[in-house]
Every structure is written in C-alpha cells, then in structure tokens.
C-alpha cells in the first residue's frame, strides 16, 4: 500500500512518515508512506493508493476528494493518532479507507 501524507509544508507529517514506514517494514507489509506539502501532493496523488491529510489541513478534504474523483480514498488523520505518530492506528485507518 502506498500512502500519501499531506500537510501544510510536509514537515509535520515527516515524523509520521518515518514511523509508518518502520511499522510497515516490521510487519512485512509491502508499500510505503511519503510526506508532502499539500501543493506537491496535488501533483503526485495518482501514484498512491490512499491520501491522508494532516488534521491542520482538514479544510482541504473536499478539494482532494474532487481531485481524486472517487478513484483514490481521502481521509483526515485523527488528531490524537497524528499528534502521537501512532503508526499502527494510522495504518489501520488507511486500510479502512481502502475497504480492507
């Protein structure tokens, strides 16, 4: 699973990117997570299976949903899981958006 993490500048999601990639590697899960600023994310979203927005850019959810046109699920990471970089919870959330 390829997960796109988007936030204002791509900085606050970088910790979550690292913990998600470590989690997926430890569990033997194929795929990766990448953190990008929202502007860059709009240019590369098609390369991912799911788009997860940081809570601070929740206001962009509809914009990303229109952009992804129902082909790629979009969700907002729950604030507590985001703040604590809970990779297991964020991964489970990404899976739920994909219907897994």
Image (tube, rainbow, N blue to C red):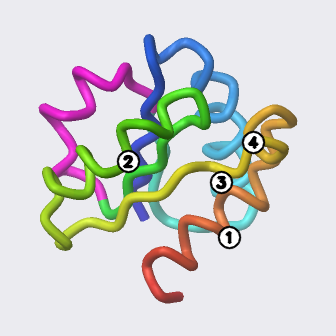
Magenta-highlighted residues? 35-48
Instruction: State the mark number for residue 79.
Output: 4
- Sooner in the amino-acid sequence: mark 3 or mark 4: 3
- For residue 41, above or below residue 37: below
Instruction: In this rendered view, identify the residue nearer to me: 20 or 78.
Output: 78
Distance from label 2 to label 1 (Cα)? 19 Å
Magenta stretch secondary structure, dominant = helix
Q: Which mark is residue 92?
A: 1
Q: Examine the rendered structure and indicate whether residue 13 appears above or below residue 79.
A: above
Q: Residue at x 59, y 22 (%)?
A: 14
Tell me the CA gap for discs 2 and 3: 28 Å
The 10 Å Cα crowd at callout 2, few under 14, some 14 to 19, many 20 or more, is some
- Front of the two marks 1 and 3: 1
Q: Sequence order check: which comes first, mark 4 or mark 1? A: 4
For disc 2, the marked residue is: 61
Sequence-wise, the earlier of marks 2 and 4 is 2
Q: Residues within 10 Å of mark 4 (few under 14, many from 20)?
A: few
The span from disc 3 to disc 4 (Cα, nearest Å) is 24 Å
What's the residue at 59%, 34% (across, down)?
17
The residue mark sitting in front, 2 or 3, is 2
């Amino acid at each position: 699973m390829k997960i796109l993490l988007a936030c204002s500048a791509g900085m606050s999601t970088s910790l979550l990117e690292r913990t998600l990639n470590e989690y997926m590697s430890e569990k033997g899960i194929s795929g990766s997570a990448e953190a990008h600023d929202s502007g860059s994310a709009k240019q590369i979203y098609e390369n991912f299976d799911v788009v997860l927005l940081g809570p601070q850019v929740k206001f962009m959810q509809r914009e990303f949903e229109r952009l992804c046109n129902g082909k790629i699920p979009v969700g907002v990471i729950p604030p507590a899981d985001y703040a604590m970089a809970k990779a297991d919870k964020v991964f489970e959330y990404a899976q739920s958006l994909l219907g897994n």
